[in-house]
Amino acid sequence: MLTISRPLTTDFSALRPDIQALQADLVRWRRQIHQRPELGFQEEITARFICDRLTEWGINYTSGVAKTGVVAIFAGQASTAIAPPEGTHTRLPVLGIRADMDGLPVQELNEVPYCSIHDGKMHACGHDGHVAIALGTAKYLKDHPDTFSGTVKIIFQPAEEGPGGAKPMVEADVLKNPDVDALVGLHLWNNLPLGTLGVRSGPMMAATEFFHCTIQGKGGHGAIPQQTVDAVVVGAQVVTALQTLVSRNIDPLKSAVVSVGEFKAGTAVNVIADSAFLSGTVRYFDPDYGELIPQRLEQIIAGVCAAHGASYQLDYHKLYPPVINDRAIADLVRSVALSVVETPAGVVPECQTMGGEDVSFFLQAVPGCYFFLGAANVDKDLAYPHHHPRFNFDETALGVGVETFVRIVEKFCPVDEDS
């Protein structure tokens, strides 16, 4: 995907004054969360911080959802002002907004006043900013209920980095009562510069799957190989053969990745290893490959092992499905993005990544759009990649995120001018 890190613009006059006035709070909230990162399903401090703000603003919420998740819900004032004709029932729209809130097992190396105080843990992917943006959106909408008609659910989700909190939240019926019609979410993105938004319909992020394979051969003396089944040789051929999985099974007009990340075998220079361990990851956009790839992967491993007289044990794990944006909701988000950045160059359509995201479980349940919010600024040394121990972003993006979410709400839940 396109990678740019110098800000496209520093003019954010499109941000309404009340959101510009929130910027100092957004930064403060983000930094407080950044200092106290927590791993998946351990986000007690973060959840308490969220609940305290929602309580202060008089917003109804449910906590402890999928262990540490929080769901805030509120309706626009315009919703109560619209009376349907007698004998009819008009269902007003319900929009979900998702923000993940967990950190990573990374030791932070940034030298900033708000550096992580939790040893070995860091907000190295921007989830602290996602929470701040969602809180700012809630605060603005609560203060301006006459600007939208319908209901907004803000879903503060645990454990995106693993083992995954979206699926248990869906299973806990966070998209029900009232039923969510569509859902949006954003990711602060250091592969795009401040002043841009990455929006596209269809596949946005890849499925995330992992495999672990143990190859069992027969060990022996390195000088007498005819008495052995060399697990290193078998494993090496498996790695090579797996490279044909994508090149000869996947439509070249589509994308997939099979990467072996681990290969462990052997204990001494003159000993032929009796076993080898391989593990890796699989990524693809097209859900149709969800069955083909693991099937072909095992067939390749089985065939190579059989050819050498080795055996194998394969564990294959499907973590997250691909993130696929609904065309109509993506079009809505794109139109909003154009009004926020006020330049066509600021909306980047070619923003796919083979990274994975469990927001995909929400988008399987309801139509929606997940998009990227450019946050890199090379001029301020704020362009390190995600998951890097020096990851940080230009906090100006926080206000842009709130403005974008608010405009999406206003467009998806419009006020009836004739009411």
Image (cartoon, grey):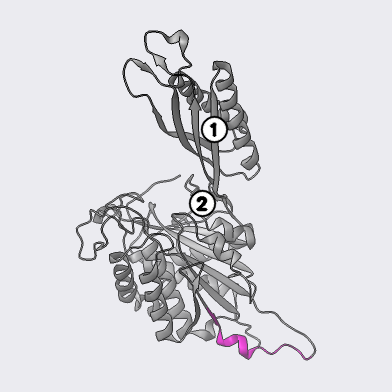
In the drawing, does residue 379 fall left or right of residue 276? Answer: left
Element type where label 2 sits in the image: loop
Query: Residue beneath label 1, please?
Result: 313
User: Where is 415 relative to 128, above or below?
Assistant: below
The x, y position of residue 400, in whole percent, is 40, 67
Judge whether residue 13 can be spotted in this image: no
> Which residue is drawn at the image coordinates 37% and 8% (left, top)?
223
Queried whether the magenta region covers residue 197, the answer comes back as no
Judge whether residue 204 can be spotted in this image: yes
The quadrant of the picture occupied by the C terminus is bottom right
Query: Residue beneath label 2, please?
Result: 349
User: Can you name the residue that lies furthest to the right here?
Assistant: 87
- State the image quarter where residue 294 is shown: top right
State the residue in front, 365 or 63: 63
> Which residue is drawn at the image coordinates 37% and 65% (left, top)?
129
State the residue in front, 36 or 146: 36
User: Where is 103 relative to 238, above or below?
Assistant: below
> Which residue is drawn at the image coordinates 33% and 68% (left, top)?
33
Q: Residues within 10 Å of mark 1 (few under 14, many from 20)?
A: few
State the residue in front, 65 or 381: 65
Range covered by the magenta-colored residues? 73-86
